[in-house]
Image (spheres, rainbow, N blue to C red):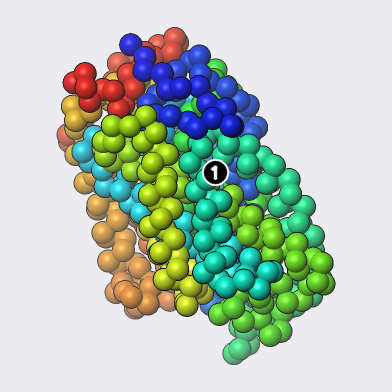
């Protein structure tokens, strides 16, 4: 039996929730993922990762770029890999995560992604968009924030096809504007910039910058399959991985480079990053860049709200309405507006802390789901992710907690808490890489201890998948 959600078009509201997308509703090209993962990075949060590498972490431009490229390529590779998982079962990323965590164990990563995507990223991006719109128009920041949020929610409310269409055209417009803006910034940058004290490099600053870049690029990882699940099952996995990975990587590196270069310009103020970034630009380019920052925030948050709603439903929240995904998206918009409003007075430090912490939970989650998928290669996983409350896998949640808790306690390097190893040694922040490796190794061991179900042999024919929400009524 297949529960089929209503067909979606850009002008029609997508009904349903996290049901599997049946074969006759599949559509699209893998190369649409290039724009899907380019557009949301063409916004000021990406630029600010480059800014903090120089202004906060004490690196010169070239040292910052080495760290930013390293972190971005790691996050882009995993983005490409995870995107290939969507077409096989037609399910969202945090639903597929149930194979590694079990139905109940998956509530924790789904809830974390709900908070980070639907609220955390939403607030961070909305603030940057609001600052840009306020600078451009002279409107109060709060009014600008309200306008930005209303547009973001409207796009996400309609659903998948409108989101994809918006990202496609936004990638063209934003790409042109930000290329011009980056060239302008480079023309004024001091590539030989030396920090006070005469040093351009520290290992601690390098790992902090690489961790922030990884957290940003990999911040999209828990959404990856959400936007590939509508693709036909026979779509080339190589094309999917390449399109998604390149979109994430190129957009991140270009705008992070612009941010790092901007931070080397005399008079740059990290506490007023939007104004400082555009200060050296001619008026026309400055105005277009501010427009792009505002539109980029919308492009990013359309995905954040949409996937935040998907994760909310993947956590097992039951909403008995056909428009349950759309209803959740509106709820996130309302709550996210007030969170963003509260973040306005200290936007710079809010960015810095959030960009580092985002990787803390994603890294051990990645370690678990990547190892789980490797261990299950060649098997069908459809029944494991669609039979509610029947499938248990304690190995996943235990490995995740081991990776998360140990890495944060020992290696975290934040104002609110610094681990003993980060205090004792000049290592910066190795939390993400330790969390990923530790969780992956722990899962290999615990998987064999608990011996969770692997699933049946993988058929060449599409699996008959029961919609996740409908399975509650059948079970």
Residue 59: horizontal and vertical position, in percent? 59, 75
Picture coordinates of residue 282, whole percent (x, y): 82, 72
Q: Position of residue 48 (x, y in %)?
A: 58, 67
The local secondary structure at tag 1 comes to: helix
Side of 453 relative to 298 (left or right): left
Image: 260 above or below 461 = below
Q: Is residue 166 above or below residue 119?
A: above
Q: On the image, numbered disc 1 is attached to which residue?
A: 155
> In the displayed structure, would residue 120 be above or below residue 452?
below
Identify which residue is drawn at 46% across, 47% down: 305
Could you tell me which residue is drawn at 66 percent across and 50 percent down?
Answer: 250
How dense is the environment of label 1, judged by Cα within 10 Å: few (below 14), some, or many (20 and up)? Answer: many
Q: Quadrant of the N terminus?
A: top left
Which quadrant of the figure has residue 164? top right
Q: Is residue 351 visible?
A: yes
Residue 297 higher or lower than 453, as above or below: below
Along the line of sight, which residue is nearer the eye, 409 or 326? Answer: 326
């Amino acid at each position: 039996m297949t529960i089929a959600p209503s067909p979606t078009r850009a002008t029609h509201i997508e009904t349903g929730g996290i049901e599997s997308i049946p074969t006759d509703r599949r559509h699209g090209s893998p190369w649409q993922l290039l724009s899907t993962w380019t557009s949301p990075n063409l916004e000021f949060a990406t630029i600010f990762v480059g800014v903090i590498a120089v202004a906060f972490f004490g690196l010169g431009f070239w040292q910052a770029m080495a760290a930013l490229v390293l972190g971005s390529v790691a996050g882009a590779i995993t983005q490409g890999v995870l995107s290939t998982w969507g077409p096989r079962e037609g399910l969202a990323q945090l639903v597929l995560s149930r194979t590694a965590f079990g139905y109940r164990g998956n509530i924790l990563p789904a809830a974390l992604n709900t908070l980070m995507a639907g609220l955390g990223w939403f607030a961070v991006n909305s603030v940057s968009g609001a600052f840009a719109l306020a600078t451009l128009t002279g409107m109060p920041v709060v009014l600008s924030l309200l306008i930005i949020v209303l547009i973001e929610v409207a796009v996400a409310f309609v659903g998948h096809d409108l989101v994809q269409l918006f990202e496609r055209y936004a990638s063209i417009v934003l790409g042109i504007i930000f290329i011009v803006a980056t060239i302008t910034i480079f023309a004024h940058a001091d590539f030989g910039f030396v920090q006070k004290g005469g040093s351009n490099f520290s290992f601690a600053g390098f790992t902090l910058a690489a961790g922030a870049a990884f957290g940003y690029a990999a911040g999209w990882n828990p959404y990856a399959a959400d936007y590939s699940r509508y693709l036909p099952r026979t779509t080339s996995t190589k094309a999917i991985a390449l399109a998604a990975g390149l979109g994430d990587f190129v957009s991140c590196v270009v705008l992070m480079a612009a941010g790092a270069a901007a931070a080397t310009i005399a008079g740059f103020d990290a506490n007023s990053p939007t104004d400082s970034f555009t200060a050296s630009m001619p008026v026309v380019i400055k105005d277009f860049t501010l427009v792009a920052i505002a539109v980029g925030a919308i492009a990013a948050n359309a995905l954040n709200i949409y996937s935040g709603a998907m994760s909310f439903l993947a956590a097992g929240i039951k909403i008995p309405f056909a428009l349950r995904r759309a209803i959740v998206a509106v709820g996130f918009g309302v709550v996210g507006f007030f969170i963003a409003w509260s973040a306005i007075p200290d936007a710079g430090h809010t960015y810095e802390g959030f960009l580092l912490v985002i990787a803390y939970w994603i890294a051990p989650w990645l370690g678990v789901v990547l190892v789980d998928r490797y261990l299950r290669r060649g098997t069908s996983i459809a029944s494991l992710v669609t039979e509610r409350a029947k499938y248990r896998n304690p190995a996943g949640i235990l490995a995740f907690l081991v990776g998360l808790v140990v890495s944060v306690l020992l290696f975290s390097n934040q104002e609110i808490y610094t681990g003993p190893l980060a205090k004792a040694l000049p290592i910066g922040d190795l939390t993400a890489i330790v969390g990923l490796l530790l969780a992956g190794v722990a899962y290999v061991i615990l998987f064999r201890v608990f011996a969770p179900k692997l699933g049946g042999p993988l058929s060449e024919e599409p699996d008959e998948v029961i919609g996740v929400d409908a399975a509650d009524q059948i079970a």
